[in-house]
Amino acid sequence: MSGHSKWSTIKHKKAITDARRGQAFTKLAREIEMAAREGGGDIETNFSLRLAIENARNANMPKDNVERAIKRGTGEDKDGAKMEQIYYEGYAPHGIAVMLKCITDNRNRTVSDIRHILSKAGGSMGDSGSVAWQFSNVSYFEIPAEGNDYDTIFELALEAGAEDVTEDGDYIRIVGPVEIFKTTHDLLQDKGIDVESSGLRLQPNQEIALDLEKTLQVVGVIEKLEELFDIQEVYSNLEISDEALEKLAEADD
């Protein structure tokens, strides 16, 4: 996961245009809406909603946007389109497996957009279950390294049952079983440790290494998928080397 984590850091540092920020807010709003639809609008009883709102606030999403998303989810706002969360599976070029977390009001549009990008790059859509077995669900926390003590966070994560705690200079990351998510979240919150990003994610059981040119080609395809309106997250089993990370960082300077 180290390559994926550092790539995530590079994305955090990208200059964000108003258009990209607007798209990011839309995706965060959809997460809030889905959480409210599934568990109600009370953050005291709906932990998923509480988490979605925290992530939105960390991204500086306006309060009005958050409140509107909650109302759409609970049905108070009758104008909201009916959304559903679904995962699609497929292959990027060179046999790299991808799992696509989507929130959409139109499955046909979503599938068409995904298929177009994958097919054009030499990949393909997969049947349900054809790729999912290559990934596991994990709890994930990303904490700014600045102002936080690694040893303290390591001990808290260990207490909660985490499997991995890493630091790359910018962020401290915690990965563990799904069932420790709330415990870890509450322990960090009780200690006043601000989490920049957290949630349940898919982690590849085994990563595939490609040469630099092919790695950058696959990364390009993944970034195009991430830009689709209906896609929330793209997970892959691509191993991202330090050399590839340097090229990605240079491209964003």
Image: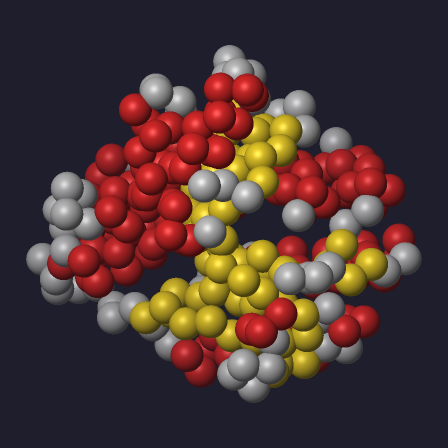
- From the viewer's side, name the closer residue of 195 and 233: 195
Tell me, yes or no, if residue 246 can be seen here: yes
Toward which corner of the image does residue 236 lie, by quadrant?
Answer: bottom right
Q: Residue at x 70, y 61 (%)?
A: 206
Indicate whether 67 appears above or below 36. Answer: above
Indicate whether 78 appears above or below 28. Answer: below
- From the viewer's side, name the closer residue of 155 and 186: 155
Q: Residue at x 14, y 47 (%)?
A: 45
Q: Quadrant of the C terminus?
A: top right
Tell me, yes or no, if residue 114 can be seen here: no
Where residue 113 appears, x then y in whole percent?
Answer: 55, 74
Q: Residue at x 30, y 68 (%)?
A: 83
Indicate whether 48 appears above or below 11. Answer: below
Toward which corner of the image does residue 2 lie, by quadrant?
Answer: top right
Toward which corner of the image does residue 192 lie, by quadrant?
Answer: top left
Where residue 245 appears, x then y in whole percent?
Answer: 78, 41
Where residue 200 appears, x then y in whole percent?
Answer: 44, 52
Where residue 16 appears, x then y in whole percent?
Answer: 55, 36
